[in-house]
Every structure is written in structure tokens, then in C-alpha cells.
Image: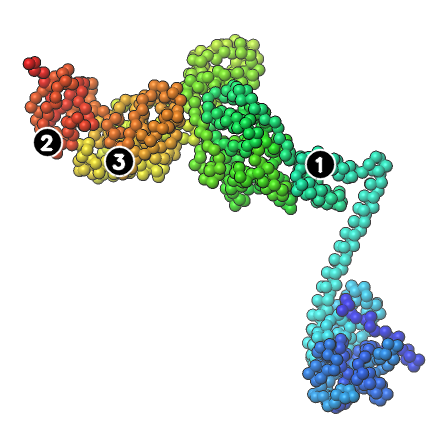
């Protein structure tokens, strides 16, 4: 179908002959005369394949079937009146009654032509519509019985119909205007049509519509409805033509723009050639030259050549040109199969590590082992280490020393707050601003494929809807997978197996288990006071003097002063806070030097107070004057610490109150301790009635600080037992361990940090689980100096070590103290002297129901300094009889 009206098939010159100069348009009067003509009862029927004839419209038709040719010839010789009907299917050669539409048009043959190809062309005009009732003959052509199909016209003066007619004219003129293939004469014809019925028929016959749509309009008897249907078709046609016009205009603009750019580029190319070369070609040639120097695999080389050829075909001003250029430059800048030469001098490496870091023997030993294997074998997958410890102990700076010892490049990638998987794997090239992941970016920055790569703060990786970065790190940190690491931007495998990854973390609890399993965990604990003094003397003080432009003779910091700064001005496992205090001391000296003012070159304690301010009290042991107070040991991400478990008893109904901002695990430990004490109260001379008639309040100070973990189990149990029995806790004693309802003591972690915290607080004895004894054997002897350890397996053993016989309220050291229930204790029959008590046998009669029995296995042993009091009466030592 053609766009708009189909006037191309009309050739009015064929109608004009010697007798006729033009074809007049059908007027209303002519239409009335035509409508008054009768419709014959029997008509010869001409089936049409691809058009519909409307009343008053003149169209040319070409007939090729024998029956149709014979019909046209005989009719033209006779009355020239035939019936025209449209076929339902244009592929049917010999249509029957069922293959024809039943509404057709009476036609008059105006002219007939014999064409050279044997076909016959006729010009026919429609007159009136009819309905075929039945076929009477099929040979030599179709004849049928017909009846008129009259048109229903609207009443005169119908304003709505007049508006419809005017709208139809305007729409038809617009269609003609927008259609480039319709001659302007068609618009002139439409303007001069007076009859509304002929206007509808003329437009319907020539509009761009299917045979089915035209037949549908022919079959509508009501003229007003047919006008509405025509307007609907014209509206659709208008929209289609407007859309085509917009598309053609846009295409024309784009073509014009491209042509303009083409001519400009050709001019630019000519100018550049005159000046000495083409910039685009020079850029491509530079890439090809650089690519020849790369140690690429076959796959990478093929990809580069393919993408370079694509860039060569691109317009340099196109938006994709910069994206393609960035991709190729990234391929060229990455150090594919480029490695630095390792230095296998183990003594030199050991010296560098010792020079830069004091302590950290495990890490140094692991690096030296790796170097030794590389030296012997020559090739080995790099280890993936994870240094876990509190802040300020040198985990990150250790990476620089390792790179220096190996003569490798050093790069660092901070993972703190990383929430997007694309930060690790990169973005796809299809996105605007796409770039490689930070792993490959750092490799490109290093310029070698075997750097020492620090993954800092791996325990602080986030997780959001953008993806899980820790899962993306699994491929990076898996020695079996990272030899073919896939970056979304590069879209090629990159070998990371030679990279020495060193991760740092403050705690392992927040690291994904699968990720933790792929790393070799090395714990980096805090430092003792002696180690901090050594670190400050070797590293911190010289570093701060250099950074502030001072010489060693301008400020001397003694070891005594450093010890005071460590103990009174810092509370940490590392040395970061100590370095800040040293920097403050150096800045004070630098300011006085710049002002030419006097200052102490060897500051003492008084000067330290003036410069740094008043010292804060460190965590110290608070004594054992009150029963129910126990010192516990805790682990935190910043190192070890001590905490105090306080217990208070008041009359009530056995309610247990727990305060101090404790977590669920610590609350469960307190509940366990209380229930175990109730279940075994008789062992310590306590009655169930006494426990049920008293409320217990257990508190851990510093309530603003959240606390949790199982380590305080034995401390809580000891505090509760001490509070109920009124027996004090041993002086300068601390403890840590988990408890069970069966009375077992379970091991806990963070032993080294807890021991350092105990030493800082002045603790001299520590109670641990027996299973923690293996942790003690791995700690340096210097850390354990001045400490005595008690290893226990059961909660009863904890009380045997921790609780004194001395009760709260005792004033004198040698004053007799009750140790049992007076109601259940028999009268003592003999007295022993205190001095001879160790050599004498204790002759004490006890009731069988007494909670404490004087036996050799008793947890409370009688000594010369602790006489036993029974029923509030003394049992004095009996003089030994001499025989």
C-alpha cells in the first residue's frame, strides 16, 4: 500500500477522448439523478481482487481472467452496466458465492483498452450499491440476483454532520499535504466536492486502507456513521504521516551532521598531514609499539588487537572513543607477567625486620620461612597472611618492612567501610565511568605482578544490596583461584598467585568464616612496658625528632620518663598513643627553639606534667577489703583490660539483678553462677533458705561501656560465693574462665592480652583453666615475669585458691575467725597452742551435718596464723606433752 491516498493508479487522460474534455465531479443534483436510476434485478458480476468500487467514483481496473475479459467486452458492447463485488480472498481464481462479499456497486463502463500484454483495462464509474442474494449463472461469467442497498442520509440542517463533513475535508487536505506522492490536484478536487456522500466515497476509495476496511465502509448504510468511520481512519493516517515526517527529519539532520563532520574531519586530516602527521594515527601507532614490549599471553594479545582494530574504525569524536581508549591504555599499563627479582639474603631480611620492628617474632619467622623455600625451590605460591591484633602494634607498617626485606613493591588497599562488590571486581565496560577494581588498580600502580599487597582492616568490610565484597575477596585470597582472577572491566584472567597478600584485622569475629579459612592467622599481641620503652627509644623518639626538624642533642628523653608516659599517660596495647605523647613533647621543644626561649633539653617528671598535663590513673588493683568483689580479665579489640565484679546482698526473695551494660553471654554466666551456688550451697556452709531470702545485685562498673563474653564466669561465681560467705578474695588475684552447670571451668581466648593487662594493673596471681596452660607456654618468659599462675579444672578449685578464711569485718590479722555454722558445730574438748599447731593433730569433734569437716582434704587448711573458732569459742593450741 502507498502512503496517503492512492491517486497514482488514476490516469484521467485515459478517460478523455475526442468527445470528452474532462471528467466532471459529481454534484448533489447528479447524485440525486444517479440514485433515482433503478437497479436491475439481475446483474453480470465482476469480482475484484484488490480494490473496492464506491458510488460516484471513477477507477481504472485491469482484468486478466477469461471470464472477466469476456464480461467486460460483452457489457461494453451492450448497456455497459455491470455489478462489481470484492473478493474475500484475492488468491481465489474462480470465486463462488461464498468467496464474494455480498455488498457491491453497480458500475458503468466508461472506456475499455486492450493492452499489449493481453490484459484488458477498463475505466468504470460506480453508481449505486446493491446486495447479492444468490448466483444464477457461473458460465460464461457470474450472474446474480440483486436488490438495492439504499443509503440512509441525515436530516437537513444536522449541525453535527456538517461539522463532521468539514473535519473530514480538513483532515483529507492535511493528509494530502503531508504525503509527498499525492498530486496537488487531489486537494483541489476535494475542495470542490459538494455532495457529502460523494465526499465520503471519494476519500474512502482513495485512502490508504486495506480491502477489508474499504469493504466495511461500503457496507455501512448510515452516511453519518460512515463519516465517523472515515474520520477514524484519517486520524490514524495523520498520526502515521506525522511520525514518518519526524523520523525523516531526524534522519536528515543526522545525515547532514555526519556529512558536515566528515568534511570537517577530512579537512582536519589534511591540515594535520601538512603539519606533520595525523594525531589519531599517531596514537594508534604508539599503542602498537608499546604492545610489542608487553609479555602478553596469546589470549591477551588477540583481545588487544581486536579492540585496537575497533578503535581504528571509530570516529575520534564519538562518545565511545574515549571509553575504548581507556580500556586499551589499561591493558597496556597493567604489568602482565612482569615481576621484580626477590632478594634471597635471609640474614639481610632478618636484619631489616629486626631493625624496623621490635618483637613480632612469629611474623618474622614466617617471612623468613617463605624466603627460604623460594631460595631452595625458586617458585612458590605466595602465602596469604592475616595479622590480628589491637591497634597500634605495627601490623600495617610491618608490610612495608616485608616489602623492603624482599626487595618487592609495596601497595596498600584499605577495606574499611567497603560495601560494593565492584570495588573489588571492577565495573563492566558498558557503564559510564567504568574502571577496573581496586585490586588491579593497585597492581597497575605497583608496576609489578608480585608486590607485597596490604589488605588493611579486612574485619571492617561492609555488606549491602550492592553485593558482598567479602565474598568477592574469596577469589582474590584463594591460592587455588587467584591465578586466574577475573575483573569485570578487563574481561580477562589476571594472575595474582605471585602477590604476597597480608591482611590486617583487630578481631576475627567479624570476618566471614570462608574468608578466614583461606588466610593464615598470625596473632600480633600488645607490648609490655619494657618492650614499649625499647620501641620508643629505637623508633618513635628518633622518628618524631626527624619529622619536627630537631637533632638528638636538642632533646633527650630518658627511659624513666618514657616509662612514666607509658604507665600514666597511655592506656593501650600498642604504641600509637605513646607516639602522640612523644610528638607533643617534641613539639613543645620545637616551639621554644623557634621562639629562642629556654626549655629543658632533658625533661624530668615535673616538666612532663607541665607539658602533657596531669596524668590519669591507670587500671590498678583496688584491694580486697570487701567481700563480694573480684577482679576479672577481659579481652577487647584494643587489647586486654581488667574489670571488677561487684556483688551486694540484701533481704528479699532470691531475686538476681544484673547491671553494668552486660551482653547476653555475660548475663547467662551470672545466672549459671547463681544457680550452681544454690545447687551446691551446703558445700560452703550456706543454707538454701538463706539464699532464697536474700536478693543479689551483681554489677560490673563502667556501665557506659558495653561488655560481653564468657570470660567472666568464674569471677562472677567467686564474687557471689564471697558475698554470701563473707569471705574475702585473695590479695592481687585475678581470674578468667568460662563455667558450666556441671561445675567445669572452660578455656577462653586472648590470654596474652589479658596477662599484659594484669601486669599493668599490678596483679601478681592469675587463675586460668588447665586447657589454657598451652597458651602460657607459647608466651615469652619476659611477659610472665612476676606472675604466678593457678590452673584449675573445676569451680570448687577456684574457690579453694581465691577465697581466704578471713571474713569481712575482721580487724586483726591473728584474730580468731569463724569458719563453720555454730548450730552444727560440737563443743571443742581440747585447745592447742598456735605455735605447735602444725606439729599437733587437730582434735575437733564435728557434727555429721556440718558443712565443713576438718580433714586433710578440706579446702580450708588450719595454720598457725589462723586459729579455728567453734560456737564463738576459741580453740587454742594444746601444749604438746613431752614423754
Number of disc labels: 3
Horizontal side of residue 509 vs 46, given as left or right: left
Residue 291 badge: 1
Residue assigned mark 2: 847
Residue shown at 12%/19% (left/top)?
840
Residue shown at 79%/84% (left/top)?
67
* Callout 2–callout 1 Cβ contact below 8 Å: no
- Of the image marks 2 and 1, the number of the one nearer the N terminus: 1
Report crowding for label 2: few under 14, some 14 to 19, many 20 or more residues within 10 A (C-alpha).
Answer: some
Q: Secondary structure at mark 2?
A: loop
Residue 224 position in % (x across, y down): 70, 77
In the figure, residue 733 lies in which quadrant?
A: top left
Report crowding for label 3: few under 14, some 14 to 19, many 20 or more residues within 10 A (C-alpha).
Answer: some
**Most distant residue in the front direction:** 376
* Callout 3–callout 2 Cβ contact below 8 Å: no
Residue 703 badge: none
Residue assigned mark 3: 743
Report crowding for label 1: few under 14, some 14 to 19, many 20 or more residues within 10 A (C-alpha).
Answer: some
Horizontal side of residue 143 vs 618, given as left or right: right
Q: Determine if residue 166 is in view.
A: no
Amino acid at each position: 500500500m502507498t502512503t496517503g491516498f492512492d491517486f497514482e493508479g488514476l490516469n484521467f487522460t485515459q478517460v478523455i477522448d475526442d468527445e470528452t474534455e474532462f471528467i466532471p465531479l459529481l454534484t448533489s443534483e447528479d447524485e440525486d439523478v444517479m440514485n433515482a436510476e433503478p437497479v436491475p434485478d439481475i446483474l453480470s458480476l465482476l469480482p475484484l481482487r484488490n480494490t473496492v468500487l464506491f458510488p460516484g467514483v471513477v477507477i481504472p481496473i485491469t482484468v486478466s481472467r477469461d471470464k472477466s475479459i469476456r464480461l467486460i467486452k460483452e457489457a461494453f458492447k451492450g448497456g455497459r452496466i455491470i455489478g462489481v463485488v470484492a473478493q474475500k480472498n484475492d488468491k481465489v481464481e474462480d470465486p463462488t458465492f461464498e468467496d464474494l462479499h455480498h455488498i457491491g456497486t453497480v458500475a458503468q463502463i466508461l472506456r475499455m483498452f486492450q493492452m499489449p500484454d493481453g490484459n484488458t483495462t477498463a475505466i468504470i464509474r460506480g453508481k449505486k450499491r446493491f446486495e447479492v442474494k444468490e448466483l444464477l449463472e457461473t458460465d460464461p461469467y457470474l450472474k446474480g440476483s440483486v436488490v438495492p442497498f439504499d443509503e440512509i442520509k441525515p436530516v437537513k440542517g444536522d449541525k453535527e454532520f456538517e461539522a463532521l463533513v468539514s473535519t473530514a475535508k480538513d483532515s483529507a487536505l492535511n493528509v494530502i499535504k503531508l504525503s509527498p506522492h499525492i498530486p496537488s490536484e487531489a486537494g483541489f478536487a476535494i475542495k470542490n466536492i459538494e455532495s457529502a456522500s460523494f465526499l465520503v466515497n471519494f476519500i474512502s476509495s482513495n485512502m490508504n486502507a486495506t480491502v477489508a476496511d474499504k469493504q466495511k465502509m461500503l457496507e455501512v448504510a448510515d452516511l453519518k456513521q460512515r463519516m465517523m468511520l472515515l474520520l477514524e481512519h484519517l486520524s490514524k493516517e495523520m498520526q502515521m504521516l506525522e511520525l514518518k515526517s519526524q523520523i525523516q527529519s531526524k534522519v536528515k539532520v543526522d545525515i547532514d551532521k555526519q556529512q558536515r563532520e566528515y568534511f570537517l574531519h577530512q579537512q582536519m586530516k589534511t591540515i594535520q598531514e601538512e603539519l606533520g602527521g595525523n594525531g589519531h594515527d599517531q596514537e594508534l601507532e604508539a599503542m602498537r609499539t608499546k604492545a610489542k614490549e608487553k609479555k602478553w599471553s596469546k589470549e591477551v594479545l588477540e583481545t588487544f588487537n581486536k579492540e585496537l582494530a575497533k578503535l581504528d574504525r571509530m570516529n575520534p569524536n564519538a562518545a565511545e572513543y574515549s571509553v575504548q581508549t581507556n580500556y586499551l591504555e589499561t591493558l597496556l599499563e597493567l604489568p602482565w607477567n612482569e615481576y621484580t627479582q626477590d632478594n634471597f639474603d635471609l640474614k639481610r631480611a632478618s636484619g631489616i625486620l629486626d631493625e624496623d620492628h621490635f618483637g613480632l617474632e612469629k611474623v618474622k619467622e614466617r617471612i623468613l620461612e617463605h624466603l627460604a623455600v623460594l631460595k631452595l625451590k625458586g617458585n612458590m605460591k605466595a602465602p596469604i597472611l592475616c595479622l590480628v591484633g589491637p591497634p597500634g602494634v605495627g601490623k600495617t607498617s610491618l608490610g612495608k618492612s616485608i616489602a623492603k626485606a624482599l626487595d618487592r613493591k609495596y601497595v596498600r588497599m584499605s577495606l574499611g567501610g567497603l560495601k560494593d562488590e565492584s570495588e573489588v571486581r571492577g565495573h563492566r565496560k558498558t557503564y559510564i565511568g567504568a574502571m577496573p577494581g581496586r585490586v588491579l588498580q593497585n597492581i597497575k600502580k605497583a608496576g609489578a605482578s608480585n608486590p607485597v599487597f596490604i589488605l588493611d582492616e579486612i574485619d571492617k568490610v561492609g555488606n549491602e544490596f550492592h553485593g558482598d565484597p567479602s565474598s568477592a575477596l574469596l577469589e582474590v585470597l584463594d591460592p587455588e583461584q587467584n591465578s586466574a582472577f577475573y575483573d569485570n572491566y578487563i574481561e580477562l584472567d589476571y594472575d595474582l598467585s605471585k602477590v604476597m597478600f597480608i591482611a590486617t584485622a583487630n578481631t576475627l569475629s567479624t570476618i566471614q568464616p570462608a574468608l578466614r579459612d583461606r588466610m593464615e592467622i598470625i596473632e600480633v599481641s600488645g607490648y609490655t612496658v619494657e618492650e614499649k620503652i625499647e620501641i620508643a627509644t629505637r623508633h618513635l623518639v628518633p622518628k618524631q625528632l626527624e619529622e619536627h626538624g630537631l637533632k638528638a642533642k636538642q632533646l633527650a628523653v630518658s627511659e624513666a620518663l618514657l616509662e612514666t608516659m607509658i604507665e600514666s599517660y597511655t592506656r593501650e596495647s600498642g604504641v600509637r598513643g605513646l607516639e602522640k605523647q612523644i610528638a607533643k613533647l617534641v613539639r613543645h621543644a620545637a616551639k621554644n627553639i623557634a621562639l629562642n626561649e629556654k626549655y629543658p633539653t632533658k625533661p624530668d617528671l615535673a616538666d612532663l606534667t607541665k607539658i602533657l598535663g596531669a596524668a590519669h590513673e591507670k587500671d590498678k588493683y583496688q584491694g580486697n577489703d570487701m567481700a563480694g568483689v573480684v577482679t576479672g580479665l577481659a579481652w577487647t579489640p584494643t587489647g586486654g583490660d581488667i574489670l571488677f565484679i561487684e556483688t551486694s546482698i540484701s533481704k528479699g526473695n532470691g531475686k538476681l539483678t544484673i547491671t553494668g551494660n552486660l551482653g547476653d553471654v555475660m548475663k547467662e554466666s551470672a545466672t549459671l553462677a547463681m544457680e550452681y551456688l544454690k545447687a551446691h550451697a551446703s558445700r560452703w556452709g550456706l543454707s538454701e533458705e538463706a539464699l532464697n531470702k536474700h536478693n543479689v545485685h551483681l554489677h560490673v562498673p563502667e556501665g557506659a561501656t558495653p561488655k560481653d563474653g564468657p570470660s567472666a564466669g568464674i569471677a562472677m561465681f567467686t564474687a557471689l560465693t564471697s558475698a554470701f560467705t563473707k569471705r574475702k578474695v585473695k590479695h592481687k588475684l585475678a581470674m578468667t574462665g568460662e563455667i558450666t552447670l556441671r561445675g567445669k571451668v572452660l578455656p577462653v581466648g586472648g590470654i596474652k592480652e589479658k596477662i599484659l593487662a594484669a601486669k599493668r594493673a599490678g596483679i601478681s596471681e592469675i587463675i586460668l583453666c588447665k586447657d589454657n596452660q598451652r597458651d602460657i607456654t607459647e608466651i615469652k618468659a619476659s611477659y610472665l615475669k612476676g606472675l604466678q599462675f593457678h590452673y584449675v579444672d573445676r569451680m570448687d578449685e577456684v574457690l579453694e585458691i581465691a577465697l581466704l578464711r578471713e571474713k569481712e569485718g575482721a580487724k586483726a590479722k591473728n584474730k580468731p575467725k569463724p569458719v563453720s555454722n555454730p548450730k552444727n558445730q560440737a563443743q571443742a574438748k581440747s585447745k592447742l597452742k598456735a605455735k605447735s599447731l602444725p606439729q599437733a593433730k587437730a582434735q575437733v569433734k564435728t557434727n555429721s551435718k556440718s558443712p565443713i569437716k576438718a580433714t586433710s582434704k578440706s579446702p580450708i587448711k588450719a595454720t598457725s596464723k589462723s586459729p579455728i573458732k567453734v560456737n564463738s569459742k576459741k580453740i587454742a593450741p594444746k601444749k604438746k606433752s613431752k614423754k
